[in-house]
Amino acid sequence: MIRSNASVILGTGSYIPSRRIRNEDFLANEFYDSSGKKLNKSNQEIIDKFLEITAIEERRYVSDDQVTSDIAYYAAVQAIESSNTDAEELDYIIVAHNFGDVKKDVKSLDIVPSLAARVKHKLGIKNPATIAYDLPFGCPGWLQGIIQADYFIRSGDAKKILVIGADVLSRISDPHDRDSMLYADGAGATILGARRNDNFPFGILSHNTRSDTVIHSQMLYMGKSYNPELEDQGEIYLKMKGRKLYQYALENVPQAIKDCLDKSNVHLRDVKKVLIHQANGKMDDAIIDRLYQLYGLDEMPEFTLPMTISWLGNASVATIPTLLDLILKGEMKDHELKEGDVVVFASVGAGMNINAVVYRF
């Protein structure tokens, strides 16, 4: 079906913090398991195994004076400039995040006003018709914001929408939990706009979302530090049931992507790139391998799966928009996108939520 109103990407931006935290920076940490027992392996062994499983060598952290709405604003400025957009013309500002503005050494939740309102304020937008709101949806939050923006645009309610994904995970991760090495900080932003589409379909072709909460809602959760000496401090940290989450993702993400491709009548062999949430290098590879198996294809063509996780880590909602921005700005070796190319965006995270979007440039 050809729609008269297409949702297209007009511009992108990102903010990659300057603080580089390498794996060896965790050598001095004391790691415990979920029962409060100190791990009986050396930190070097723990780090070597972590690298083998995740492909993460380093990650980025914000500076002490920055919070999530700050880096969301920096990414937004880039997206606005790259799209030649007058910020006053924005119909919506949607900010996907999970933890609000967590300040250094202050773990309390700060989401009033919303981060979207804070970004709008920082941008100096006076237009009261620019509606600003937040979207907490786990790691798939930015992509769900894109899906919501597509609905607004196709309905005729909006012409230009700013969707941002930003998180500061370094301040909500437990330094005594080896999973803390996964997490990073960052922000990515996208301007989605309306364009007339009377002939060849382009822009967002289809999308698909699912939420599994009866059994899987506690795969990611907030809990006390694994260090028993800190249990009484009252602070809570991001926790993950890694093995169960891994299995859930392998069982459900490939089919969710295929369902999305089926909606758009696009075959996997016609997809130029798969931009998947940078969660875990081994897991992402396994998801895509299983997706190709669903189509009876032997293996993924070279350069189909661009990855930033080795040097940026897992910054939750920021990973896909940052990856997209780097590709479009020519900063990802061996990866480029041109007119007519089809890409698939896909993510999985807390909820458990899965979503996917098929897009033609």
Image (spheres, helix red, strand yellow):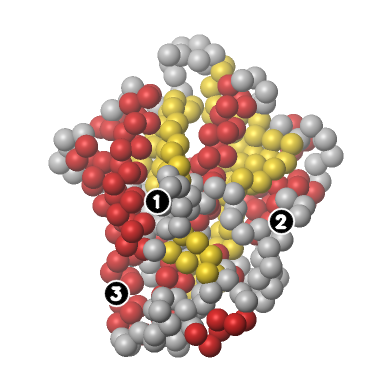
Element type at mark 2: loop
Q: Quadrant of the N terminus?
A: top left
Task: Estimate the spatial distance between the alpha carbons at disc 3 and disc 2, rounded to whole Å.
Answer: 36 Å
Task: Estimate the spatial distance between the alpha carbons at disc 2 and disc 1, rounded to whole Å.
Answer: 28 Å
Q: Which residue is mark 2?
A: 111
**Which callout, 2 or 1, points to the residue nearer the camera?**
1
* x 69%, y 35%: residue: 92
- Residue 299 spot, x, y in % from top left: 18, 44
Q: Which residue is mark 1?
A: 215
Q: Amino acid at mark 3?
A: Lys
**Left or right relative to 269: residue 215:** right
Do residues under tags 1 and 3 come within 8 Å of each other at their CB atoms? no
- Residue 354 spot, x, y in % from top left: 43, 43
Q: Is residue 276 above or below residue 146?
A: below
Lower position in the chain sequence, tag 1 or tag 3: 3
Asked which quadrant contains residue 129, the reply is: top right
Q: Amino acid at mark 2?
A: Ile
Lower position in the chain sequence, tag 2 or tag 1: 2
Q: Amino acid at mark 1?
A: Ile
Element type at mark 3: helix
Residue at the front extreme, as displayed? 214
**Residue 234 visible:** yes
Q: Which residue is mark 3?
A: 49
Viewer-closest of 238 and 115: 238
* x 71%, y 56%: residue: 111
Viewer-closest of 335 and 205: 205
Q: How dense is the environment of label 2, judged by Cα within 10 Å: few (below 14), some, or many (20 and up)?
A: some
Q: How many marks?
A: 3
Lower position in the chain sequence, tag 3 or tag 2: 3
- Residue 51 spot, x, y in % from top left: 32, 71
* x 44%, y 76%: residue: 177
